[in-house]
Image (cartoon, grey):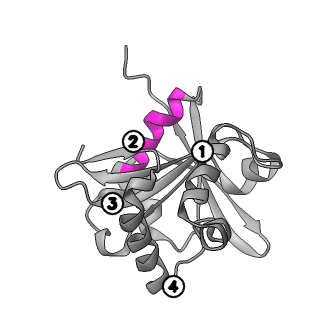
Amino acid sequence: MRLKLVPPTVVKEAEFISMIEEFHAAGEAHFVDEDVLVSQGFKVYISWLERCQLGQLEGLSPWSAYWAFDCQNDNLVGLCSIRHSLSPWMAEYGGHIGYRVRPTMRRQGFGTEILALALQKASQFGINRVLVVCEPTNLASISVIQNNDGLFERQVSVDGALRNRYWIPIVDTDE
């Protein structure tokens, strides 16, 4: 693999903010809990992510955030989140794993790698079958999911917007 997943850290603030700015410039500001980041600052945002992982935020199921770095040059390529368990809404519309590749790093296979690494992390949380959801018009994401053995289950409507549901079995590589 060309990438490694690491927990968010204050040490990489400049790189993370640069990636966020790329998402904004591409019109994609809907992926990060920016209210915490913008209103309370980066250190509070990192602490908030740590509390999410521990299940310390009321109304949210525990979930872990990871940033994907290129192993050769340590550049921040993207991010992912893994929900340890699914609320009823997430079980229908959200899924276990979300991932993003920064706009300048797309079309290089990084999405497939980020999802593959996230699947390995998901198995560490005791998840043996992962639900991944994407928009039916997001052909790149569909390809990423299928490259990771995702099987289309059905399409659902979320507030009038369609979403495809895919299931990916976690294969135990220790055998």
The residue at the point 25 percent across, 64 percent down is: 108
Q: How many residues crowd mark 2 within 10 Å: few (<14), some (14–19), many (20+)?
A: some
Please tell me which residue lies in front, 55 or 136: 55
Q: Which residue is mark 3?
A: 76
The image quadrant that residue 39 belongs to is bottom right
Question: Of the residues tagged 1 and 3, which is closer to the observer?
Answer: 1
Q: Position of residue 148 (x, y in %)?
A: 41, 45
Closer to the N terminus: mark 1 or mark 2? 1
The image quadrant that residue 106 belongs to is bottom left
Q: Amino acid at mark 1?
A: Glu
Q: Which residue is mark 1?
A: 50
Q: How many residues crowd mark 4 within 10 Å: few (<14), some (14–19), many (20+)?
A: few
Label 2 secondary element? helix
Which secondary structure dominates the residues rendered in magenta? Answer: helix
Closer to the N terminus: mark 4 or mark 2? 4
Please tell me which residue lies in front, 47 or 67: 47
Q: In the rendered view, would you say 76 is above or below 115? A: below
Closer to the N terminus: mark 4 or mark 3? 4
Which label is found at residue 27? 4
Q: Which residue is mark 2?
A: 117
Mark 1 to mark 3: distance in Å? 19 Å
Closer to the N terminus: mark 1 or mark 4? 4
Q: In which quadrant is the N terminus drawn?
A: top left
The residue at the point 72 percent across, 57 percent down is: 93
